[in-house]
Image: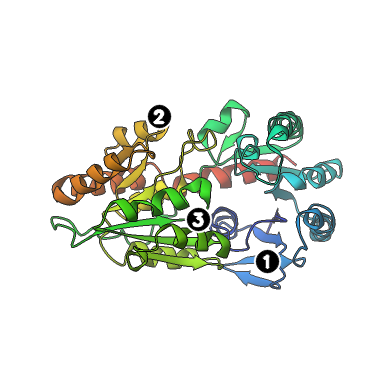
């Protein structure tokens, strides 16, 4: 059995892309699979994946120094055929592994160049410079590795990378979509990390301008941001639910919520930002798999996507009147919502699913090992 090791100094151990998709897929396909992480929660085995914990960090500097050293030392002990790194701060350790004759994959989860522009801890005048330097550094470093990308548009920076796209795992049983029935209420759901740049306030404020809607957020939200949200909607708190204040929400809990009722739409109404304008959000495909139409910002790419597959509606995130009109339209026309729900689920089951991506993942691993 061939040994493979995934390395992360920052991601949660139950990360959807790292553990639930890639590591579990590798273990299922006969690889001796390890995941080295740093959260202080101890070792465990999850669906055949052996998780090694090097301990929690004490802040950014500690994470990028001591923790990366511990992750690297554990990687050396495991002496695997293939390593996969998931964080830019592990690039120097990945290069060391390459120098020792190891095959290393650099998995690019994020558009780090545009995300640097959103880092509030960096002075505004420094962000463009830091982004430019990092862009050159990451491109240079990628020449040492096999590169995976989680988004199609990352090909603009890494044209030779392999697309291992972040599509959802199909349920064992196709979810039943309750159709031909008008929704009893205007219930909207948002899943994933709750942050300002992902519309935490933008979406919550809809409760103030649209009296009939109810909104559920399910995903980690820091307590300070949660309080800001509550402060913005003092008269609408009874119509707002936040699951995940201060706590990581397991993905199976999110699935349960998707299936708990008929949702009018899944929210992705983000403020206008360069970082998200080309992204295909994982939440799009999760909503679609469970027959939930997408209600998203009208970035050109997002608008084109929901139009092409007729699986949702794009709106101007700054125009509450338009958003109210589109929500009312979905509510008043259940046949339109039904069509979108069917189209959404069909598209995911045919094109946008992890099972298709898993085949590519396994092919690359076999090739790397057999080329030794």
- Write down the quadrant of residue 264 in the picture: bottom left
Of label 3 and label 2, which has the lower sequence position?
A: 3
Camera-side residue: 269 or 229?
229
Residue at 70% over, 61% down = 37
Graded by Cα atoms within 10 Å as few (under 14), some (14 to 19) or many (20 or more), the crowding at tag 1 reads many
Question: Callout 3: helix, strand or loop?
Answer: loop
Q: CA distance from mark 3 to mark 1?
A: 27 Å
Q: CA distance from mark 3 to mark 2?
A: 23 Å
**Up/down of 345 relative to 236, above or below:** above
Residue found at x 76% / y 63%: 57
What is the C-alpha distance between the residues marked 2 and 1? 40 Å
- First in sequence: mark 2 or mark 1? 1
**Residue at the disc numbered 1:** 51
Query: Which x, y percent locates residue 322?
Result: 27, 39
* Residue 121 drawn at (x, y percent): 70, 46
Name the residue beneath numbered marker 3.
Answer: 194
From the viewer's perspective, is 111 left or right of 254? right
Q: Which mark is residue 300?
A: 2
Q: Does residue 365 appear to the left or right of 372 in the view shown?
A: left
Horizontal placement of 215 versus 262: left or right? Answer: right
Q: How is the image coloured?
A: rainbow
Q: How many numbered callouts?
A: 3
């Amino acid at each position: 059995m061939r040994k493979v090791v995934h390395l992360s100094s920052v991601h949660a151990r139950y990360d959807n892309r790292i553990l639930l998709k890639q590591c579990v897929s590798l273990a299922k396909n006969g690889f001796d699979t390890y995941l080295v992480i740093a959260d202080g929660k101890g070792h465990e085995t999850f669906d055949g994946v052996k998780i090694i914990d090097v301990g929690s960090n004490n802040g950014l500097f500690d994470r990028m120094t001591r923790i990366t050293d511990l992750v690297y030392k554990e990687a050396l002990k495991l002496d695997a055929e293939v390593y996969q790194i998931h964080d830019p701060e592990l690039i120097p350790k990945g290069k060391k592994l390459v120098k020792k004759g190891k095959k290393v994959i650099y998995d690019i989860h994020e558009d780090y160049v545009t995300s640097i522009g959103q880092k509030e801890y960096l002075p505004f005048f420094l962000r463009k410079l830091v982004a430019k330097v990092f862009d050159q550094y990451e491109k240079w470093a990628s020449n040492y590795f096999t590169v995976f990308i989680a988004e199609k548009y990352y090909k603009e920076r890494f044209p030779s990378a392999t697309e291992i796209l972040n599509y959802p795992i199909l349920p064992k049983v196709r979810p039943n979509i309750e159709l031909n029935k008008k929704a009893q209420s205007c219930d909207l759901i948002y899943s994933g990390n709750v942050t300002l740049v992902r519309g935490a306030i933008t979406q919550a404020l809809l409760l103030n301008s649209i009296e009939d809607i109810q909104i559920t957020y399910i995903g980690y939200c820091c307590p300070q941001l949660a309080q800001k949200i509550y402060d913005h909607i003092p008269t609408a708190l009874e119509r707002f639910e936040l699951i995940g204040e201060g706590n990581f929400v397991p993905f199976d809990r999110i699935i349960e919520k998707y299936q708990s009722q008929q949702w009018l739409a899944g929210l992705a109404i983000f403020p206008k930002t360069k970082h998200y304008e080309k992204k295909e959000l994982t939440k799009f495909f999760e909503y679609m798999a469970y027959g939930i139409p997408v209600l998203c910002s009208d970035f050109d790419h997002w608008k084109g996507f929901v139009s092409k597959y007729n699986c949702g509606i794009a709106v101007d995130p700054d125009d509450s009147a338009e958003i109210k009109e589109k929500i009312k339209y979905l509510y008043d026309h259940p046949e339109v919502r039904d069509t979108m729900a069917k189209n959404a689920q069909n598209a995911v089951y045919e094109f946008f699913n992890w099972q298709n991506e898993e085949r590519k993942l396994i092919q690359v691993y076999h090739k790397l090992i057999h080329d030794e």
